[in-house]
Structure formats: structure tokens, C-alpha cells
Image (spheres, helix red, strand yellow):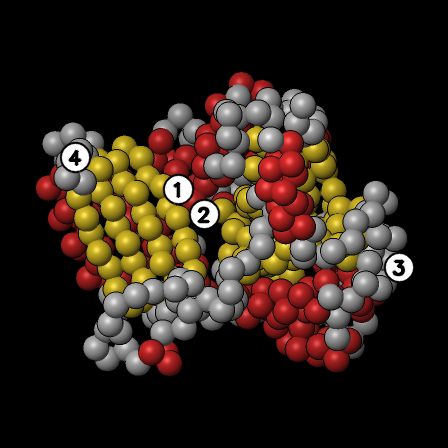
């Protein structure tokens, strides 16, 4: 029995040692699955709201098709699947104000939702008419993950309140790390850049379960209520619709993560803020992601882990780096190839563009202030 266990565990250990790379930028098609729990008696209202929404979604660039399904066992359970040419156009749409407005009529008849996004790796059956196989790209090979889901929230506070907000956010009591038997909070890192707050979290298990767990904790609710007066966008956490809209707009998804083969106990966590020119946020995030992939292949690179978050024109890069930011500004900024400096600066908003290629100044402009960085105790 012992010999069998050793043979079974060996591939797992070998797999865990490989470089981790997760990205939305491989160009393959995307399948989105939305599980919907509809209030009893609201099925017809939900169907009518969906039909109105679909008329608008059909014209969104990158959208290919949709299917709406109803459970044969529980009429309150519905499934919406959609196919997209690739992940970036879907993310651009789902994180837009247009999407917030489009789905609002459905909220009154929905009890709960769960969204899952997948790159298509393999498929069987005939290619759809009008969709040549050369254009229906599949993910080339399975990616190797590390079991951690990364997500961030961002919002702005009223100018002049930054110091007060930082004090409130730095002093919160950490929630219980263990959410349930399958989900655990691993790390929470909170940064500010001017009046912008970014909270990045790492979770093993179910991200939605972790977010709901945190929101229910009295100490977290107390902090959220304390910063309410300082928010630029008003919210009422006692009003389900107000809270839903706020956190929908605050979502800052991870679009790329890479972990190098090497580890270092001396690595420091930093965050960099790259405000993009209007409409160029995804392109800027893709450039940084490509550069981080190159850096992860270089054993000399001080960057050990990097996660790029993007929503609209807000791009944030969270890194674990040896030697601090100033020791290697090029690597810290995410430029494995210094020749990419001009391209990076053309994608940045004018207020963040140093114009003269001064990387030290660009690093100063992008650097975020660390408010708190908390790891959960390892599993027993």
C-alpha cells in the first residue's frame, strides 16, 4: 500500500514544480457558463428579460452564440452558455457599464448566480456553418496551475480622505481563513495609489464562497461601513442592489499570472498602477503579460511571481520581487525587453507617461503604497 501511494504522489509533486502560467491572452475561443437560480414563479419574467438582453448581446464584438437552458429537475435552475471568439472581448463587455445596465432588469427575478469561464481545449462534432475551422482556435495544451485563484477589487475615495481611509483599512481584523472544507483564504494584499484602493486576494477553492464568507464577517462589515462616507461612489450595503452594483464595478479580474520556477524567502510584494489611455487597457495588460512570460523564463530575473489585473483603463500588476523595486527598474516595471519602453509609454495615460523614457520616474509614478499584506497560517 505504501509503495502504491508513493508512485501515485510522485507525478503530483513533479507537476507542482513546473512553472505556473494562467492567461486570457492565448487567442483560443471562450466558453462562458452562467448558473442562475430564479425565484419561484419568476420564470416567465426571467425568460422575457433574457430575450431582451440577448438582442443586445448578439451585436457585441466577439460574441459568437448563446444557449439558454432550464433544468428538467428544478424549474428554478437555469443555465446560460455563451461562446466568444476569445476571452478579451468578453471581459471588455462583462466589465463595462453597458453590461451593468443590460443585466439590471434580470436582478429582480434572480436569487443567485455563478459565472464560470473556460478556454476551449478540444471539441467533437461538425464545425458550424460559416465558421471555418482555422478561425475556431482551441487552446493548444493544458495549463499548469497552482490551485490558487487570484482576484482584486478596486474603488476610489474622496480626495483628501486618503490618509484616514488607509488607517481604517490597515487596522481591520483578519477574517477566519478556513471558509469550508474545500475553500481557504491564503493572502490579502491591500494597496493605494492616490485615492485609488486595490485589494488583491488569493484563495484556494471557491472564490465566490470566499468572497461571501468575508462579506459576512462582522469585523469586515465594520470596516466597510467605516469607509462608506469617504467613497466617491455611494453605496448602501443593506440594499442588495446597491451592494451588487458597487462590487460589480469594483471587480478587477486577473487576466494573467505567471510563477517562475524559483523561490526566495526574501521576495517582497509590491503593486504597480498603470493607468491606460482610453480604450487601451486590455492591450496594455497584454503587453505586460507577454513581458512577464519572458521574464519568468530568465533565471536572472528578480521577479518571481506576477499577476496582471485589468478592468477598462485600470491596469494593476502585483509582483513578488527580490531586492525591491529600485534595484532593477526595468524588471520591476515588467519590461523583460527594454526595447518595449516606447510601446509601454504610448499605451499609458498622459498623466502617467514620463515622455522622456525616464524609467526611474515612471517607476515612481506607478508605485503603489502598501497598506497591509496578510498571509493566512498554513494548513495544519
Q: Mark 4 or mark 3: which is in front?
A: 4
**How much space separates mark 3 and mark 1, taking CA atoms?**
41 Å
Answer with mark 4 or mark 1, whichever residue precedes in sequence: 4
Answer with mark 2 or mark 3, whichever residue precedes in sequence: 2
Answer with mark 2 or mark 4, whichever residue precedes in sequence: 4
**How much space separates mark 1 and mark 2, taking CA atoms?**
6 Å
**How much space separates mark 4 and mark 3, taking CA atoms?**
60 Å
Answer with mark 4 or mark 3, whichever residue precedes in sequence: 4
Quarter holding the N terminus? top right
Q: Which residue is mark 4?
A: 73
Asked if the residues shown at circle 1 and circle 2 are in contact, with their CB atoms under 8 angstroms apart, the answer is yes
Q: Position of residue 94 (x, y in %)?
A: 39, 55
Quarter holding the C terminus? top right
Q: Position of residue 51 (x, y in %)?
A: 16, 54
Q: Which residue is mark 1?
A: 245
Q: Mark 4 or mark 1: which is in front?
A: 4
**How much space separates mark 2 and mark 3, taking CA atoms?**
35 Å
- Taking the spot 16% from the left edge, 34% from the top edge, the residue there is 73
Q: Is residue 187 visible?
A: yes
Q: Position of residue 372 (x, y in %)?
A: 72, 35
Q: Is residue 45 above or below residue 365?
A: above
Instruction: Determine whether the residue tagged by mark 2 lies in a helix, strand or loop.
Output: helix
Q: Which residue is mark 3?
A: 327
Binning the other alpha carbons within 10 Å of mark 2 as few (below 14), some (14 to 19) or many (20 upward) gives some
Asked if the residues shown at circle 2 and circle 3 are in contact, with their CB atoms under 8 angstroms apart, the answer is no
Residue 376's label in the rendered image is none
Q: Which residue is mark 2?
A: 249
Binning the other alpha carbons within 10 Å of mark 3 as few (below 14), some (14 to 19) or many (20 upward) gives few
Amino acid at each position: 500500500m505504501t509503495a502504491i501511494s508513493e508512485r501515485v504522489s510522485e507525478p503530483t509533486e513533479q507537476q507542482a514544480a513546473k512553472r505556473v502560467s494562467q492567461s486570457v491572452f492565448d487567442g483560443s475561443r471562450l466558453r462562458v457558463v452562467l448558473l442562475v437560480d430564479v425565484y419561484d414563479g419568476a420564470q416567465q419574467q426571467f425568460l422575457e428579460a433574457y430575450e431582451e438582453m440577448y438582442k443586445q448581446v448578439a451585436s457585441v464584438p466577439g460574441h459568437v452564440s448563446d444557449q439558454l437552458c432550464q433544468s428538467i429537475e428544478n424549474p428554478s435552475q437555469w443555465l446560460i452558455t455563451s461562446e466568444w471568439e476569445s476571452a478579451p472581448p468578453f471581459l471588455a463587455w462583462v466589465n463595462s457599464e453597458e453590461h451593468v445596465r443590460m443585466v439590471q432588469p434580470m436582478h429582480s427575478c434572480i436569487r443567485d448566480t455563478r459565472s464560470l469561464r473556460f478556454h476551449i481545449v478540444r471539441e467533437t462534432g461538425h464545425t458550424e456553418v460559416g465558421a471555418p475551422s482555422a478561425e475556431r482556435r482551441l487552446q493548444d495544451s493544458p495549463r499548469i496551475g497552482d490551485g490558487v485563484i487570484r482576484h482584486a477589487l478596486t474603488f476610489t475615495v474622496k480626495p483628501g480622505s486618503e490618509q484616514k481611509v488607509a488607517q481604517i483599512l490597515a487596522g481591520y481584523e483578519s477574517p477566519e481563513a478556513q471558509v469550508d472544507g474545500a475553500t481557504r483564504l491564503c493572502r490579502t494584499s491591500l494597496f493605494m495609489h492616490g485615492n485609488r484602493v486595490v485589494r488583491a486576494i488569493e484563495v484556494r477553492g471557491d472564490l465566490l464562497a470566499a468572497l461571501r464568507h468575508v462579506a459576512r464577517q462582522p469585523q469586515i462589515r465594520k470596516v466597510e461601513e467605516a469607509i462608506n462616507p469617504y467613497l466617491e461612489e455611494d453605496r448602501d450595503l443593506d440594499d442588495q442592489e446597491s451592494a451588487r452594483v458597487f462590487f460589480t464595478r469594483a471587480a478587477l479580474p486577473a487576466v494573467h499570472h505567471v510563477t517562475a520556477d524559483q523561490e526566495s524567502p526574501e521576495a517582497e510584494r509590491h503593486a504597480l498602477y498603470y493607468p491606460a489611455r482610453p480604450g487601451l487597457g486590455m492591450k496594455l495588460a497584454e503587453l505586460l503579460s507577454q513581458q512577464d512570460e519572458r521574464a519568468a523564463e530568465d533565471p536572472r530575473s528578480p521577479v518571481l511571481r506576477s499577476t496582471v489585473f485589468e478592468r477598462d483603463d485600470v491596469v494593476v500588476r502585483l509582483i513578488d520581487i527580490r531586492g525591491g523595486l529600485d534595484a532593477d527598474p526595468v524588471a520591476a516595471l515588467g519590461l523583460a525587453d527594454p526595447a518595449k519602453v516606447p510601446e509601454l509609454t504610448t499605451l499609458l495615460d498622459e498623466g502617467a507617461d514620463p515622455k522622456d523614457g525616464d524609467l526611474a520616474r515612471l517607476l515612481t509614478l506607478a508605485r503603489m503604497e502598501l497598506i497591509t499584506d496578510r498571509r493566512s497560517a498554513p494548513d495544519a
